[in-house]
Structures are given as C-alpha cells and as structure tokens.
Amino acid sequence: MRAVRSALATLLAAMAALALTATAAHAAPKPAPHADAQRAAAGSGYLYVSQDANWAGRWCWWYNADTNWDTINVAENANCDNNNRASMRNLASSAWNDSNTGRPVALYIHPNYSGAYACLGAGDAWDNLTGAWFTWGSNRDGYMQNANDNIASHRWLSSCSVG
C-alpha cells in the first residue's frame, strides 16, 4: 500500500509539473526592456506598454500602429496578457519601443494620432511614465502634459519631428 501511495504521489507531481510547463509555454513572455545589448539591437518589432510603472500589472503589445487604444485589435497585430483585448487607453505607465527597424514611435494624447505626442526612440524604454511628457507638437492640444495614464494612440515614425 505504501508503494502505491508513493507511486501515485510521484505521478501526480509529474502531471502537475507538466501542466505548469505547458501553461507557461503558451503564455506570452512579459516584456524585459533592459535584457541585453544584442536583444536591444535585434528588436522584436513591438511596442510594449504596462498598466503600472516598472512593468507591473496588465500589459499589451502592438506590431502595427493603433488609432485608438480603447480596444486592442487583432488587425494591428496587437494583444495583451491573457489574450485580453480590453482598453489600454489612458492606462499605460511603462512603455518600451522594441523596434526592429530603428524607428521611433509616437505616443499620442488623443485617438487618431492627434494632439501632442511623446516620442520614444528605437530600443528605448520608459519604466515609469510619470517622468515622460508630450513634448512634441507645441501647437497641439496636450502639449507638455504628463504621459502617464494619458496615451490614446500610437504610430511608428521615420523621425520624431514628423509626428
């Protein structure tokens, strides 16, 4: 009887480990913006944002531009952790441009790439958006406002001055 219990316990432990490994393999990796120089040079091509500072909380990523962060759309090659496609508008507190083309990304205060914008260079990450401002578009609404919990759309640029 003791041998059967031991074998059963071993089998259950192995099954639990296998289930945990399978679950982890299907989950998207949480962004790690400061991984290493080689990764930073290669880039994944995504813009990553996290709901809380220092990459805590819910997070999303996009490959293409997005005119409105109210909903995360498959058409933008975008997704969020746990396949959640809920709004990220005015919720981001961390941002990372993991560009694979060397292009900056403009983070706009309003949907449809309107209003002032913050420009995040290729490979750059802002771990805490309370230190980031909409410093581009001096004649636009939202100029010099804080970017934390205030981003509504984004697009890739050839340079920060063309947003």
Image (cartoon, rainbow, N blue to C red):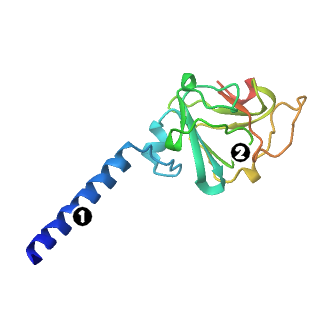
Crowd band around label 1 with a 10 angstrom C-alpha radius: few (<14), some (14–19), many (20+): few
> Which residue does the numbered mark 1 point to in the structure image?
13
Residue 83 % position (x, y)? 51, 38
Mark 1 against mark 2, which lies toward the viewer?
1
Give the distance between the C-alpha atoms of the residues marked 1 and 2, in whole angstroms. Answer: 40 Å
| Res. 116 image quadrant | top right
Left or right position of 147 against 76: right
Crowd band around label 2 with a 10 angstrom C-alpha radius: few (<14), some (14–19), many (20+): many
> What quarter of the picture does the C terminus occupy?
top right
Left or right position of 9 against 145: left
Residue 50 % position (x, y)? 62, 47
**What residue is at 9 percent from the left and 75 percent from the top?**
1
**What residue is at 79 percent from the left and 44 percent from the top?**
133
Label 2 sits on what residue type?
A: Leu
| Res. 27 image quadrant | top left
Residue 35 % position (x, y)? 47, 51
Upstream in the sequence, badge 1 or badge 2?
1
Label 1 sits on what residue type?
A: Ala
**What residue is at 66 percent from the left and 53 percent from the top?**
52
> Which residue does the numbered mark 2 point to in the structure image?
91
| Res. 63 image quadrant | top right
